[in-house]
Amino acid sequence: MIVCENLVKIYKTNEIEVVALQGLDLLVEAGELMAIIGNSGSGKSTLLNMLGGLDRPSAGSLHVDDKDLLKFTDKELVKYRRETVGFVWQNNARNLIPYLTAQENVELPIMMLKGQRDRHKRAAELLDMVGLGHRRKNKLEQLSGGEQQRVAIAIALANEPKLLLADEPTGAVDTKTADQILDVFRELNSSMGLTVVIVTHDQEVSRKVDRVVAIRDGRTSSEFIRRRSYREEIEAMANEMDPESEQKDTHEELAVLDRTGRLQIPRGYLDHLDISASNKVKIELEDDRIVLVNPNKGAVKKAAHGN
């Protein structure tokens, strides 16, 4: 569904240049439910805007659903946003109109995209899909924050997208409500085969998805891969005899190598070796391991992969 290769984004003003993405690589399969995490300024929101056709890369390659977004005209980008992607934002004001009911909020984009025909029925179906069929006549002030976000998800599905992009969808709600929202994404992914990409700074989201990509300084630094499927973990938790039923370490972290062999070493490893203040390390091959050595102290830390 998504192929990013050596993606670069530079924002320019009269006085400065800001490099938001520095050769980012990313592959997302069709029908995948995954998350992108990173601190503020890491480039994750910039990536989301480019995946959604809201911004253009400065260099590199970006394909979504076999479409080359770098070659799109402005008109083609509008068509892409209307037909291929749906958006869910942290700020409900970007999705919802406060003086309309939940039903009317969902009907509005359907009417704009498809006209008047069957908009009532389709809006009701979408609200049922996100568990809000019983609240469709309520205005936003009568809905909780979590219910409003589920209305926003229903709106994002109005154009029947192949790719659903969610920017910090749980950032403004409590933990229980966040779990409910993530369960909606899981159900949509499972029942519709919808590709869902969630951008967040909350690593707890990883418990609900099978793969997490971490971005640091504008590059993919590592991936967290689920050791076993979410369904298997739920079944294991129900089985008290399963010795792994209370396992907290559900994912394995793998560093990401780019095409030239570069990778980002976790900051904690560098601090442990007291390398943070230097930009040089000694690299040795020891049997089936690549070993990093502090050239000043000779301290050895086995930091990277076996064959």
Image (cartoon, rainbow, N blue to C red):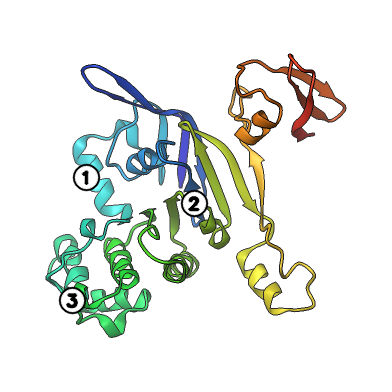
Is disc 3 placed on a helix, strand or loop? Answer: loop
Q: Give residue 88's quadrant in the image.
A: bottom left
Q: Please tell me which residue is depicted at 81% across the width and 30% down the height of the picture.
A: 289
Q: Nearer the viewer, mark 1 or mark 3?
A: 3
Q: Is residue 271 visible?
A: yes
Q: Give residue 278's quadrant in the image.
A: top right
Quarter of the image for the C terminus: give it: top right
Residue situated in front as seen by the camera: 108 or 148: 148
Which residue is label 1 attached to? 78
Q: Please tell me which residue is depicted at 27% across the width and 49% down the height of the picture.
A: 81
Dot 1 or dot 3, earlier in sequence: 1
Is disc 1 placed on a helix, strand or loop? Answer: helix
Q: Please tell me which residue is depicted at 80% across the width and 18% down the height of the picture.
A: 298
Circle 1 Cα neighbour tier, 10 Å, few/some/many (<14 / 14–19 / ≥20): few
| Alpha carbon separation for disc pair 1 and 3 | 30 Å
Circle 3 Cα neighbour tier, 10 Å, few/some/many (<14 / 14–19 / ≥20): some
Is disc 2 placed on a helix, strand or loop? Answer: strand
Q: Position of residue 76 (x, y in %)?
A: 23, 41
Left or right? Give the position of 99 relative to 47.
Answer: left
Q: Nearer the viewer, mark 1 or mark 2?
A: 2
Note whether 87 is above or below 152 in the view shown: above
- The disc at residue 134 is none
Q: Position of residue 6 (x, y in %)?
A: 47, 28
Which residue is label 2 attached to? 35
Task: Give amino acid for label 2.
Answer: Ala
Q: Position of residue 111 (x, y in %)?
A: 15, 66
Task: Give amino acid for label 3.
Answer: Lys
Left or right? Give the position of 191 relative to 139.
Answer: right
Task: Give amino acid for label 1.
Answer: Val
Q: Position of residue 73 (x, y in %)?
A: 23, 34
- The disc at residue 139 is 3
Q: Nearer the viewer, mark 3 or mark 2?
A: 3
